[in-house]
Amino acid sequence: MACGDHLPLSGGALTGEPAAAPMTWMGVATDDIIQLETQGEAPYSVNLWTVLVDDDLHVFAGDNYANWVEHIEGNALVRLQSDNLVYALKAERITDPAHFEQFAQAWETKYGNRPRNESVQETYLFRLTKR
């Protein structure tokens, strides 16, 4: 998959094998990129970076009010694909500064730099949890 300046790329519905959420997300968290499907007028998927905080996966749009962010605000039910497995999840926006700091540290550990905008009020950070 593409990375860096090429993220996110968008598409339609994910086509992998439906799977129950694992007991731990450690395996998925090692992926550099996952695919996240949101529900707007039609299924919409993007390639995103993800990190693990407190045993939950997190995805981040920065301060970009992207289509997928708008979709989550209208419908928090999402699907995540890693390898060929697709997990049904729920997205919750994080607005707590302490939680955001944990995320920023995990992001830096995984990707080598902190988020460009660290204002929890101006950015879109989502925790993904089991439905």
Image (cartoon, grey):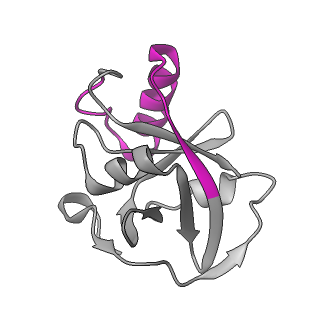
Is 2 in front, or is 100?
100
Q: Quadrant of residue 118?
A: top left
Q: Is residue 24 left or right of residue 61?
A: right
Looking at this view, name the residue that lies furthest to the left: 5
Magenta part of the chain: 89-118
* Residue 74 in the image: above or below residue 92: below
Is 42 in front, or is 28?
42
Q: Residue 61 location, x and y as percent?
A: 32, 44
Q: Residue 48 location, x and y as percent?
A: 38, 58
* Residue 64 in the image: above or below residue 98: below
Tell me what residue is drawn at x 36 percent, y 65 percent: 46
Q: Indicate yes or no whether the magenta region holds residue 43.
A: no
Tell me what residue is drawn at x 61 percent, y 60 percent: 28
Tell me what residue is drawn at x 57 percent, y 76 percent: 83
Q: Quadrant of residue 8?
A: bottom left
Q: Is residue 111 left or right of residue 93?
A: left
